[in-house]
Amino acid sequence: MNGYGGTILRVNLSTGEISKEAYDPEVARNFLGGRGLGIYILYTEVPAGTDPLSPENKLIASTGPISGLLVPGAGKMDWTTKSPLSGGYASASIGGHLTAELKFAGYDSIIFEGVSEKPVYLYIEDDTVELRDAGHLWGKGCITTEKMLKDELGEDFQIATIGPGGENLVSYACIGHDYGRQAGRGGVGTIMGHKKVKAVAVRGTGAIPVADNDRYWKQALAMYKACKESDGLEVWQRYGTTIVTSWCDEVGALPTRNFQQGSFEEGPNLYGDVMREKIVITDKGCFGCPSPCGKYSHSKKHGIRVEGPEYETIALLGSNVALGDIEDVAYANYLADELGVDTISVGNAIAFAMECYEKGLIGPEETGGLDLRFGNAEAVFTMIERIARRDEGLGDLLAQGVKAAAQEIGGDSMDFAIQVKGMEQSGYETHSATSMLLAYMTCDVGAHHNRAWAITYDLEVGRDKVEPGKVAKVIQLQHYRPLFDALGACRLQWIELAIDVTQYAPMLAAITGEERSWEDLVKISERIWNLTRMYWWREIEGFGPEWDLPPARFYKHPSTGGPTEGELTPLESVKKLRTMYYEQRGWTEDGKPSPEKLAELGLSELVDRYG
């Protein structure tokens, strides 16, 4: 199979058996790879109603046909599972060099099933694949574990690992790689921890076959040349995602004090230029990347080095908890990375608890005497550690996510539990940004921006407008952006460097030998999107329109400050957006893909067979 390793590894942790299977070319054709292969395996192999924390659940790590090849940003891997946080579909993308190394070893995907009796790690060196004892690594942090395994195995090995957060089954534990990259969302690290898999170590020395080498090289050089000549390259290389911080603060999209407002009075202390001057040491990129957005930093104040903070971490562990010192944010970032918890979810959880504390819904008895007020940096650091350890009381409660915490705390706390479908919202304030609000409402994993970053469109056409064009834009983005996660490539070269997105079709054709247009690929992305929607319908009893509502904060309680002060999106408008979305997608009025839509996408037989 041109563009593919051609082999899927199946690791049965209960028996210790490891098998190698041929990758079905028809599945590759219809779902490409990455998140497409992930949802296909999850839907067809994990029985309906499976408890996420059971041996029957599976963790699927998948590359794409572009992964590991000479394509800008071809370093992405998807991790798919049934989410312990939401009970629905989880898909988390990770950058770095792991996906390329796995392809070089000849594998497209790893399927973890069952549960090991003791801690293990998966060792892969070309044809040699084995489970090895990880008792000496258990209890260690992600960064520490990666260093230990590189010391043992050699620098050429690429490592993915979990920290104490995953071991202790924090519902939003992440998988770390390359000293600062994470598959962060939905609890993929939790499932890895439940299966007692501490790490994956990969070394590959093979090549990836391509159909037309001359055409491939010509297309690759043209794409790199376009990146080099992009007007956005210099500033993106210098600041990476931190360039978003000042923009969000200025337009009222920077989440502040648990999304109560969209601007932070100490925001300028967190801007990209301040971070660059104060703590950044060097730039850091993933495999094949011409525009390294990673920033490796040194906080002298706290005596740590960390990759980041990226924008999302600055937003959720900075302004959202009211920390106005970039060095404090960097230290919070370090703790989360080492302990192995998602910075977005843990930042939301702590901000939620801070608001509960300030409103009197919890007090010193619940916090163990901790003064859990906004702006208390030491309280943030302490709570990250308590959550990762699942300390009895508040640490254990917040480790379950803000939805579960609000259900326990009660009062009006559910109004400001900032989540959709059980997943905490990423870093864009949406009191008055209806495209972005809809994107969060309908995202296939919960409130995450990476499927449709639509907030710039809100500012372009009017942030409070409720119209079919906005819905159409969200759907387009939900097909374009996640397509990159199926291909195994980073989307930032398209977004930040304005690379012509249609170039990926001839590139894929040169690699695989099959001619398909960009529109053909978008149709595959739509197929994947609808299958993930059917997964929610299959797995969640009572699933329907109520699961596509935003937090009540955005339609009941006006923004308290910044450019959007006093604004909200009325519930009537929220429901109108939702109705238009269902109609444009060809779904039923309760949000289920119609039989006609499933037939159009070639999903009818699969859905009929697996429920």
Image (cartoon, rainbow, N blue to C red):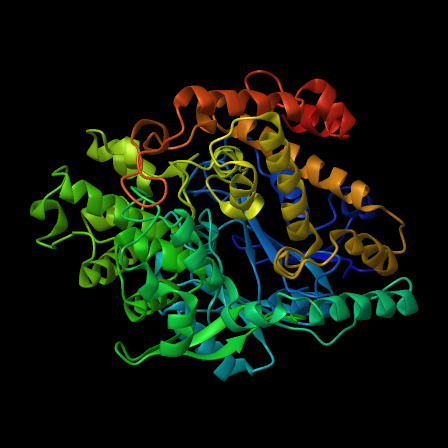
Residue closer to the observer: 127 or 497: 497
Residue at x 89%, y 49% (from the top left corner): 515
Using the rendered image of the protein, determine whether residue 518 is visible from the camera's viewpoint.
yes
Find residue 425 and report its image quarter.
Answer: top left
State whether residue 463 is above or below residue 370. Answer: above
State whether residue 227 is above or below residue 155. Answer: above
Q: Quadrant of the N terminus?
A: bottom right
Residue closer to the observer: 43 or 284: 284
Using the rendered image of the protein, determine whether residue 58 is visible from the camera's viewpoint.
no
Find residue 421 and report its image quarter.
Answer: top left
Q: How far from the left and from the top, in percent, is residue 153? A: 54, 81
Residue closer to the observer: 54 or 326: 326
Residue at x 41%, y 31% (from the top left corner): 550
Q: How far from the left and from the top, in percent, is residue 287? A: 64, 70
Residue at x 58%, y 22% (from the top left corner): 580
Q: Is residue 66 left or right of residue 141?
A: right
Figure label count: 0
Find residue 61 and report its image quarter.
Answer: bottom right
Q: Is residue 311 left or right of residue 479?
A: left
Q: Is residue 188 left or right of residue 171?
A: right
Q: Quadrant of the C terminus?
A: top right
Q: How far from the left and from the top, in percent, is residue 25? A: 82, 48
